[in-house]
Image (cartoon, helix red, strand yellow):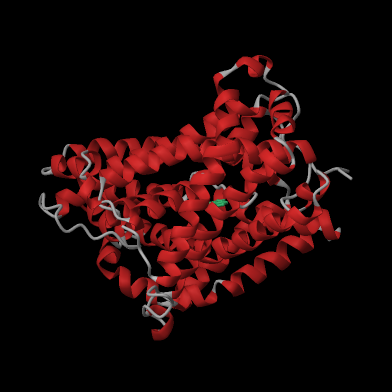
C-alpha cells in the first residue's frame, strides 16, 4: 500500500511543515480582525483556552491516526477497519476545498500588496475596497498563487516546503517582532494594548464563543484531516506529543504577537479611541500601509515589502497543506498520478473560489448580506471553519475514543515517547478524547448551527 508515499526527512522537518501549515493568514490577517470583532481580550482568553484545552488533544489524535495508518484523511478510517467512518475524512476533504477556495483569494490580496509595497504605493490602504473589487487583477494574483501552490505540492512535500519553512518562519517572526516594538513606541499604543489584553467579559456573546473556537481550529489547521495527512508522513521514531506541542506553541505565539503588533497600531491611527474598533477583512490591509508609509520612503518600502512577501510565504505553506489533503486522497484512493491530481484539484478549487473572488464588491448579490446575513466569501468561511472544522474535531475525537478505542490511540502515541504511560499528557488526553472534546465541541457545534443558520441565540 504505502509504496513510495514519502516521509518527512526529520522530526524538525515535520514540525516546520506542520507549523507552516498552521501559521498563515489565519494568524496575521484573520486573528486580529476576529479579536476586534469579538470585543478584544475576552475573545483572546477564550481563543487561548480553546487552543490548549480542546485543540491540542485533537491535534495529537489526528497525527496519531495518520502515522498509524500511513494513509490520506479518508483512507485512514478504512485502514483502521471502519469504512463507514471514512465519511469524516470526506467531510475534511470538502472542508479543505472550501477553505482553500476563499483562502487563495485572500492570499492573492497579500501578494498584490507585496507588489504595491515595492513600488511604494502606500495609498493602497485607502483604496482597499477598490482593490479587492477589481476581480480581474485579484484573479490574476490568485491564479499565480494557486500555480505556486500546485508547483510545490506536485514535487512532494519534503523538498520545497521543508526547506522553505526553515528559513521563512524565523524571518516572519523577526519582522513581526520589529513591528511590535515600533508599534509600542507610537503614541496611544497603551489604549491598544489595553483593548487587546484587559478583558471586558460583558462583551462576550455566543458569536464570540463560536468565533474563538472556529478560529482556534482554523489557525491550528485542525478538524479536516490536514494533520492526519501530514501525520501519515511522520516517522515511527518521533515523539509526536512534543511535535504537537511545538506546533501549537509556535502557532499560538505568532497569532498572539500579531495582535501585539496590530492593536497598538490601530490605537495610534484612531488616536487612542478603541470604543469603536472595526474589525472586518480589511483590518491589516487598511491599517498597515499607512504605518509603513510613516517609516519614510526607503524603510517603508523595505519593511512593507518584506512584510507582505513573508505574509505571502506564510500563506503559501498553508495553501500547500490545504491542497495536499484532497490530492493525497485521490492519489491514495483512486491511484491517480500525483501531478495530474495536483493540477486537476488546483483548477477545480480555483473555480470553486470564483464566487468568493466576486463577493468583494464585483458582483452585488454575492457581496451583499444575501447568504444567511453574510456575503458569499464570509459565508463559505463560516460554513467551513466555524461549522465543519469543529464538527470534524468532535467526530475525530469520538471516533478515536470509542470506535477505534482509546487504548489503540495511546499505544500509537507511546511509540517514540518512553515515559508516556505515566505522564500527565496521557491522563489529560484520555479525559479530553473521551469526555471533554466530544461533549464541549458537539454542544458548541449545535449552538453554532442554530446561531448561523437559524439565527437563534441562547446568550
Ligand atoms: N492554519 C492556516 C492559517 O492559519 C490555514 C490552514 C491551512 C488550515 N491548512 C488548514 C485551516 C487545514 C484548517 C484546516 O492560515
Residue 293 visible (yes or no): yes
Q: Which of 295/432 is in front?
A: 432
Horizontally, residue 65 falls left or right of residue 352, namely right
Task: Report the front residue among 401 and 218.
Answer: 401
Q: Residue at x 16, y 49 (%)?
A: 267
Image quarter where the N terminus lies is top right
> In the rendered image of this protein, does residue 146 appear above or below residue 85?
below
Q: Is residue 427 above or below residue 64?
A: above
Give the image quarter of residue 346.
bottom right
Which x, y percent locates residue 163?
62, 38
User: x, y percentage for residue 454?
Assistant: 43, 71
368 or 150, nearer to the observer? 368
Number of callouts: 0
- Left or right of 368 on screen, residue 231: right
Quarter that holds the C terminus:
bottom left
Seen as rendered, the residue at the extreme bottom is 364
Question: Would residue 110 appear left or right of 429 to someone viewing this image?
Answer: left
Image coordinates for residue 239, horizontal then vertical, percent: 66, 24
Question: In this rendering, would 32 be left or right of 379?
Answer: left
Q: Position of residue 431 (x, y in %)?
A: 56, 31
The residue depicted at 64 percent of the width and 63 percent of the height is 94
Residue 233 in sight here: no
Instruction: Name the residue rendered at 69%, 35% in the picture.
Output: 64
Amino acid at each position: 500500500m504505502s509504496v513510495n508515499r514519502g516521509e518527512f526527512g526529520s522530526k524538525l522537518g515535520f514540525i516546520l511543515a506542520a507549523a507552516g501549515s498552521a501559521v498563515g493568514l489565519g494568524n496575521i490577517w484573520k486573528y486580529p480582525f476576529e479579536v476586534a470583532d469579538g470585543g478584544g481580550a475576552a475573545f483572546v482568553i477564550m481563543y487561548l483556552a480553546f487552543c490548549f484545552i480542546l485543540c491540542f488533544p485533537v491535534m495529537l489524535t489526528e497525527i496519531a491516526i495518520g502515522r498509524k495508518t500511513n494513509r490520506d484523511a479518508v483512507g485512514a478510517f478504512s485502514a483502521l477497519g471502519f469504512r463507514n467512518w471514512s465519511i469524516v475524512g470526506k467531510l475534511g476533504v470538502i472542508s479543505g476545498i472550501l477553505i482553500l477556495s476563499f483562502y487563495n483569494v485572500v492570499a492573492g490580496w497579500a501578494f498584490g500588496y507585496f507588489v504595491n509595497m515595492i513600488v511604494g504605493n502606500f495609498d493602497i490602504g485607502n483604496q482597499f475596497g477598490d482593490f479587492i473589487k477589481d476581480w480581474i487583477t485579484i484573479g490574476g494574483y490568485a491564479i499565480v498563487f494557486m500555480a505556486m501552490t500546485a508547483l510545490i505540492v506536485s514535487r512532494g512535500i519534503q523538498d520545497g516546503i521543508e526547506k522553505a519553512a526553515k528559513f521563512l518562519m524565523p524571518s516572519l517572526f523577526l519582522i513581526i517582532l520589529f513591528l511590535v516594538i515600533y508599534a509600542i513606541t507610537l503614541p496611544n499604543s497603551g489604549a491598544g494594548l489595553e483593548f487587546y489584553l484587559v478583558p471586558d467579559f460583558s462583551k462576550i456573546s455566543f458569536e464570540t464563543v463560536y468565533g474563538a473556537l472556529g478560529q482556534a481550529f482554523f489557525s491550528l489547521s485542525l478538524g479536516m484531516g490536514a494533520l492526519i495527512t501530514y501525520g501519515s508522513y511522520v516517522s515511527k521514531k518521533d515523539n509526536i506529543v512534543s511535535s504537537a506541542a511545538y506546533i501549537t506553541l509556535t502557532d499560538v505565539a505568532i497569532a498572539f504577537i500579531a495582535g501585539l503588533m496590530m492593536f497598538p497600531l490601530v490605537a495610534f491611527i484612531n488616536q487612542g479611541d478603541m470604543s469603536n474598533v472595526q474589525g472586518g477583512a480589511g483590518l491589516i490591509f487598511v491599517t498597515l500601509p499607512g504605518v509603513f508609509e510613516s517609516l519614510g520612503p526607503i524603510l517603508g518600502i523595505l519593511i512593507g515589502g518584506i512584510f507582505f512577501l513573508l505574509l505571502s510565504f506564510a500563506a503559501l505553506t498553508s495553501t500547500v497543506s490545504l491542497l495536499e489533503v484532497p490530492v493525497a486522497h485521490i492519489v491514495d484512493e483512486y491511484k491517480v498520478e500525483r501531478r495530474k491530481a495536483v493540477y486537476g484539484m488546483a483548477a477545480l478549487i480555483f473555480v470553486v473560489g470564483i464566487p468568493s473572488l466576486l463577493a468583494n464588491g464585483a458582483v452585488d448579490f454575492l457581496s451583499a448580506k444575501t447568504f444567511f446575513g453574510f456575503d458569499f466569501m464570509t459565508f463559505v468561511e463560516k460554513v467551513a471553519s466555524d461549522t465543519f472544522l469543529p464538527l470534524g474535531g468532535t467526530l475525530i475525537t469520538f471516533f478515536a475514543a470509542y470506535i477505534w478505542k482509546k487504548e489503540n490511540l495511546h499505544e500509537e502515541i507511546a511509540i517514540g515517547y518512553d515515559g508516556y504511560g505515566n505522564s500527565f499528557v496521557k491522563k489529560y488526553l484520555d479525559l479530553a478524547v473521551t469526555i471533554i472534546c466530544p461533549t464541549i465541541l458537539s454542544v458548541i457545534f449545535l449552538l453554532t448551527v442554530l446561531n448561523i443558520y437559524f439565527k437563534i441565540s441562547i446568550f
